[in-house]
């Protein structure tokens, strides 16, 4: 539910107060996405919400791990004193929180230092930084994300594997039901609530389908501006989890939540238009693919290994990208080839686009968008040439991509190119957060180790 004001700058604090009054808002969720895509911020009474003074939070929220810890570099290198930052609302994101018991508004915020500088380790700013590079070239990227996720039974003991939930029939799914209408209808009450929640937030869902896994669904968002779509993906994940809990289920966006089931991806379709003409720069006037299109694909091929830690940000992400996983573990491209990392769907010249099939559903949508767009951008400005498109069934090829989070972080940290385009400080901070999570994971002894090593070695 976006504002009726055509220019966000016109949406003053007076206008926000009027919107609060018109919608009888009692509370406000002032939200900022952190490194992992978790919604951080404050909940304040509507009458106390102030745009002029801004919401204040410690800068350390962008260095908090999913486990709630902070890396060793927390004070020494990245933020030192952990002083306050100021959150300013993006007024175009104002909407209702449809599941709240009292009328509640939500606003996504950007982070600034006291002298007005953007906080350069904030994921939303990182995406804006990439979009600025496109703007300076007279280009505007267009994206459309597809988000896969599983519905599972509530699991309050993390030692137990996840299981599919019970649907309307009273039975859990036993097998895979790709594209089954009846399988989606098993969860019709939940789906209806999700559509209702999304409509109230202005989230534009294109389609919803059943995917290959047991109780695995996918939603496609309508194509548009990358920042807007990242906001929508960020809010949809939260919406889906809230709706599922109200139907005694969990919705999980883990990349690989269940053994012997497929993983969950966030495929990102992307194209680029010329700002002056509005034409897709991936196509020539005669309808054939342009040199810029081929260079964009080549940029994805060359630079994706260096940003894989942003597309596959968790230890679990690499279970989805492992052998026999069904995910495209390579850097190949091809026309309508779903086994290639970069698929070019069959489309008209006006709709020519490339689909990056590597990002996991667990990725922070702001950082996943920034990562894939910067790779394509670099390919175009460097006038790179791609490999030949493949029409073969592709698997993993040696040295194509990092095989673990630790390996991906090493590549990311060592990339001078990414330090230049994304910022030294962001690279340092992001690596610190994800490496701390990696080290925490390696302190955990798995059930497989106890099962096979306890008495046998």
Image (cartoon, rainbow, N blue to C red):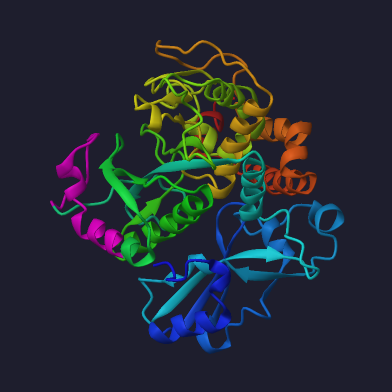
184 sits left or right of 142 in the view:
left
Question: Which quarter of the figure is the C terminus placed in?
Answer: top right
- How many circles with numbers are drawn on the protein? 0
216 sits left or right of 287 in the view:
left
The quadrant where residue 318 appears: top right
The quadrant where residue 285 appears: top left
Q: Which residues are magenta?
A: 169-196
Q: Nearer the viewer, residue 299 or 36?
A: 299
Q: In the image, what residue occupies the spot 59% across and 31% down?
A: 376
Residue 436 in the image: state x and y as whole percent: 70, 47
Can the viewer see residue 312 in this picture?
no
Q: Relative to 456, say whether 152 is above or below.
A: below
Q: In the image, what residue occupies the spot 45% across and 59% down?
A: 235
Residue 233 in the image: state x and y as whole percent: 45, 52
Q: Relative to 272, say whether 329 is above or below.
A: above
Residue 303 in the image: state x and y as whole percent: 64, 27
């Amino acid at each position: 539910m976006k504002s009726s004001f055509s220019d966000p700058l016109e949406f003053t604090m007076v206008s926000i107060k009027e919107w609060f009054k018109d919608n009888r808002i009692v509370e406000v969720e002032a939200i900022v996405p952190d490194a992992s895509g978790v919604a951080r911020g404050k909940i304040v009474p509507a009458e106390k919400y102030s745009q002029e003074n801004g919401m204040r939070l410690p800068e350390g929220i962008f260095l908090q791990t999913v486990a709630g810890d902070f890396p060793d570099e927390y004070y020494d290198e990245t933020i030192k004193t952990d002083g306050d930052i100021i959150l300013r609302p993006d007024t175009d994101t104002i909407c209702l929180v449809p599941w709240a018991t009292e009328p509640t508004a939500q606003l996504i915020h950007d982070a600034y230092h006291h002298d007005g500088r953007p906080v350069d380790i904030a994921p939303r700013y990182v995406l804006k930084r990439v979009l600025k590079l496109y703007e300076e070239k007279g280009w505007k990227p267009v994206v459309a994300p597809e988000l896969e996720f599983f519905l599972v039974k509530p699991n309050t003991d993390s030692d137990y594997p996840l299981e599919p939930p019970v649907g309307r029939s009273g039975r859990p799914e036993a097998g895979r039901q790709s594209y089954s209408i009846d399988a989606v209808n098993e969860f019709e009450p939940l789906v209806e609530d999700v559509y209702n929640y999304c409509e109230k937030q202005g989230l534009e869902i294109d389609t919803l389908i059943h995917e290959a896994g047991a109780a695995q669904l996918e939603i496609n968002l309508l194509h548009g501006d990358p920042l807007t779509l990242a906001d929508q993906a960020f809010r949809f994940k939260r919406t889906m989890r809230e709706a599922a809990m109200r139907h005694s289920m969990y919705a999980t966006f883990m990349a690989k939540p269940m053994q012997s089931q497929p993983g969950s991806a966030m495929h990102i379709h992307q194209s680029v238009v010329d700002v002056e003409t509005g034409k897709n720069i991936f196509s020539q006037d005669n309808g054939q693919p342009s040199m810029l299109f081929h260079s964009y694909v080549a940029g994805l091929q060359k630079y994706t290994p260096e940003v894989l830690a942003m597309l596959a940000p968790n230890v679990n992400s690499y279970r989805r990208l492992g052998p026999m996983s069904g995910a495209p573990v390579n850097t190949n491209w091809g026309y309508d080839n779903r086994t290639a990392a970069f698929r070019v769907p069959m489309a008209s010249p006006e709709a020519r686009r490339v689909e990056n099939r590597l990002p996991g559903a667990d990725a922070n949508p702001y950082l996943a968008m920034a990562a894939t767009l910067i790779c394509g951008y670099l390919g175009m400005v460097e006038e790179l040439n791609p490999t030949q498109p493949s029409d073969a069934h592709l698997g993993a090829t040696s040295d194509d991509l990092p095989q673990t989070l630790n390996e991906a972080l090493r590549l990311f940290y060592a990339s001078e190119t990414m330090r230049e385009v994304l910022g030294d400080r962001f690279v340092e901070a992001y690596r610190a957060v994800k490496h701390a999570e990696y080290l925490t994971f390696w302190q955990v002894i798995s059930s497989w180790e106890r099962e096979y090593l306890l008495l046998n070695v």
